[in-house]
Amino acid sequence: MNLLLISFKYLIAKPLSSFLNILILSLGIAIIILLLLVSKQFEGELSKNSKGLDLVVGAKGSPMQLVLCNIFHIDFPTGNIPLPEAEKLAKNPMVKKAIPLALGDSYESFRIVGTNHKYPEHYEVELSKGGIWEHEMEVTVGSSVARKLNLKIGDSFNSAHGMGNAVGHEHENSPFVVKGIFKPSGSVIDNLILTNIQSIWAVHEHKEEEENENGENHDDHEHHHETNENEFSATGLPLGDEDEEITSLLIKFKSPMAAITMPRIINENTEMQAASPAFEITRLFSLLGVGIDIMEGFAYLMIFIAILSIFIALYNALKERKYDLAIMRSLGSSKSKLFVLVIIEGILITLLSAIVGLMLGHGVVVSIGYFLEDGQKTGITGLIFLPEEILIVLGAIFIGIITAFIPAIQAYKTDISKILAQG
């Protein structure tokens, strides 16, 4: 006698009841899977991209905005800081490494970042094709940028001021040329277009000249290509006039003590602002944690309702099948087989719910990464399987056993003679 087949036939005998039970439980599991995938990957992305960076220094404003913009590139700059002030800070004996960033422009919603070669070196990104930028108006693009925009070595494009829905003026007379393409690294650089800071200055200087000429097309950017990556000071910051500005500095200190004292000194004694990536990430997760806890609570409520529903369905089904069970007993089935039969039915419902829940949870995350622009740039994907998901499946099986236990006991205690006499 195939108990698994009999249990399955019992389930499909009442398709609506079985469907509703599976749907409620699978939705609860799907929410948990969704939260698990997003939170784990988001936390991993934040930790990976901020690793090795002790401080972000930029214009005064929101510290969290400063970190989100300059490390994760998912917000707008708080403003710019004077190049001389940044150079002075980079020369501080406590600073081990200072990476300058100049932001403001984008191409097809991908941010263009002016920086130096220390930036890709920090994330240990390797080249896939071509070379790294050397002269002005040359760019090296991240793997995701190249793939999604179909960029190849030698291609040129015009940048636009702003990001996303806030894109403004397009710099038509200052084209960038693709010099190289990075290999996929799983870091934020996959979604960036990198060039030197002089290129960012040159583009905006050219825009100002066009505005001063009252719209005349005065092309004078040829001299921009004469500068190269070597035109940096000993600190790694670009050489420029005193009125030049950059967006931020990413700093790594020589000792942990500097990370404690320097932020206070910068915030109190300069016009700049210092923000700790570690502190702001912790604060961000504490803010997100409230929403995650609410959604988890809702998911567990749905699971509880599903467990109760499955228990009631199995208990009522047992009453309806008591004559069938008595016949099975009279044909030679033992009490233990009837017990196992009901347990298998409970496991089947919860196991099917777990499988559907896993598929729904992963499907939603895949959709987020595929259809939403911000989802694509965060690197969150539904095409991975976390170890915790095994525990969820095992937990579903355990729920099936617990839910079916009382009905299974009732089946075990079936009185053959009494039921057949009633029939």
Image (tube, helix red, strand yellow):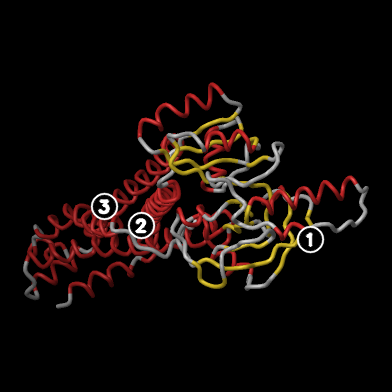
Q: CA distance from mark 2 to mark 1?
A: 70 Å
Disc 2: CA contacts within 10 A as few (<14), some (14-19) or many (>=20):
many
Where is residue 117? Give x, y as percent.
53, 56
Q: Which mark is residue 21?
A: 2
Disc 1: CA contacts within 10 A as few (<14), some (14-19) or many (>=20):
few
Q: Residue at x 37, y 57 (%)?
A: 26
Above or below, comparing residue 121 to residue 263 in the picture: below
Q: Residue at x 65, y 56 (%)?
A: 109
Which callout, 2 or 1, points to the residue nearer the camera?
1
Disc 1 secondary structure class: helix
Disc 2 secondary structure class: helix
Which callout, 1 or 3, points to the residue nearer the camera?
1
Label 3, on which residue? 311
Q: Confirm whether residue 289 shows in the render.
A: no
**Quarter of the figure that contains the C terminus:** bottom left
Where is residue 305? Give x, y as percent.
34, 47
Label 1, on which residue? 222
Where is residue 223? Give x, y as percent.
77, 58
Q: Name the foreground residue: 38 vs 282.
A: 282
Instruction: Tell me: 368 left or right of 136.
Output: left
Amino acid under disc 2: Asn
